[in-house]
Image (cartoon, helix red, strand yellow):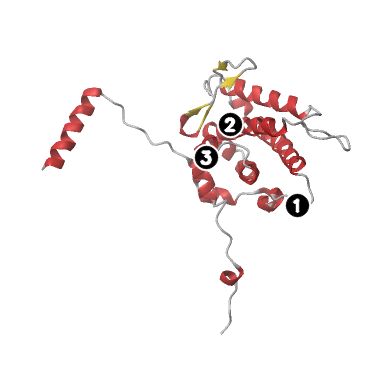
Amino acid sequence: MLRTLHVNFRMKKGKKNDKKPIVEEKKPYLDPELFKQLPGHVDIRKVVTKPRNIDEREWIATHAIALFHNINQLYGTVSEFCTADTCPIMQGPGQKQYAWVDERGKKLKCTGPQYVDYVMTFCQKCASNQDLFPTKYAQTFHESFYSEIKKILRFLFHVIAHMYYSHFARLKQMDMVGYLTTVFKHFTYLDRDFHLVDRQETSTMDDLVEAMGLFKPMPSSSETSVTER
C-alpha cells in the first residue's frame, strides 16, 4: 500500500512539473546485418596492429593521415545534404553537441557543415606541418606530436559521430555503410590500441563498438579445434 501511494504521489508531482517524456533515440546503425557490408573484406584489426620494428609515432601518424583522408572523402558524399538547415547544430548520438574552440579559447556554436569545415581545415594544416608529420629521412617528430594527434583524432571522431547521427540514412541509401563501418573500426582500433582519445569522449558510440563485437576475446585454439571420434 505504501508503495502504491508513493508511486501515485510521484506521478502527481510529475504532472505538476509538466515534464516531457524522454523519447528513446532510434539508432538504425546498430542493425548487425549492416556490419557485414565491408568493402574488400579487409581485416582492420590486423591492419592497425603495429609491427615491432616500426616507430610508434610513425605508425600512428600514418594511420591518422589515412583516417583524415578517408573521413573527408566519406563526408564529401553527403556534404550537400549537411547544411545549416538540416544540421543547424553539430551533433552526434545521444544529441551530443560539439562546439568549436578557436585559438583564443572561445567556444563557437557551429552548424554541422561549419564544424566539419573547421575540422578538415585544422587537420589539413597539421598534415602539412613537417614538425608534426615529418617526411624527410632522419627527421624527428616534434615533442607536441601526441597532444596534437589526440586533437586530430578527437575532431575526426566528432565527424564520424555526426555522420552516424545525422546522415546514416543517406549513406545507407547510397550503399556507403560498409565504408562508414570500415572507417569507424579503423578509428576505434587505433584509438584503443594507443589510448589517444578520452573514453568519455567516445562513449556516445560504445553501443556500436559492442554491437560490432570489436573487442570480443578471440577463441583459443583448444576451443576452436574439433576432435573426431
Which amino acid lies under the numbered mark 3 shown in the image of this protein? Met
Q: Which of 3 and 68 is in front in this view?
A: 3
Separation (CA) of disc 1 from disc 3:
28 Å
First reached walking from the N terminus: tag 1 or tag 3? 1
Q: Which residue is drawn at 44% across and 38% down?
A: 26
Which amino acid lies under the numbered mark 1 shown in the image of this protein? Pro
Residue linked to disc 1: 51
Q: Which of 105 and 213 is in front in this view?
A: 105
- Location of residue 101 with respect to 30 vertically, above or below: above
Q: Residue at x 56, y 17 (%)?
A: 107
* Quadrant in which the C terminus appears: bottom right
Quarter-of-image position of residue 141: top right
First reached walking from the N terminus: tag 3 or tag 2? 2
Residue linked to disc 2: 158
Mark 3: secondary structure: helix
Quarter-of-image position of residue 160: top right
First reached walking from the N terminus: tag 1 or tag 2? 1
Q: Position of residue 63 (x, y in %)?
A: 72, 41
Residue linked to disc 3: 205
Q: Tell whether 130 sits left or right of 108.
A: right
Q: Do the residues labelled 1 and 3 touch (CB within 8 Å)?
A: no
The disc placed on residue 127 is: none
Q: Residues within 10 Å of mark 2 (few under 14, many from 20)?
A: many
Q: Tell whether 166 sits left or right of 149.
A: left
Q: Where is residue 114 in the image (x, y as percent from the top left)?
A: 61, 20
Which amino acid lies under the numbered mark 2 shown in the image of this protein? His
Mark 1: secondary structure: loop
Q: Do the residues labelled 1 and 2 touch (CB within 8 Å)?
A: no
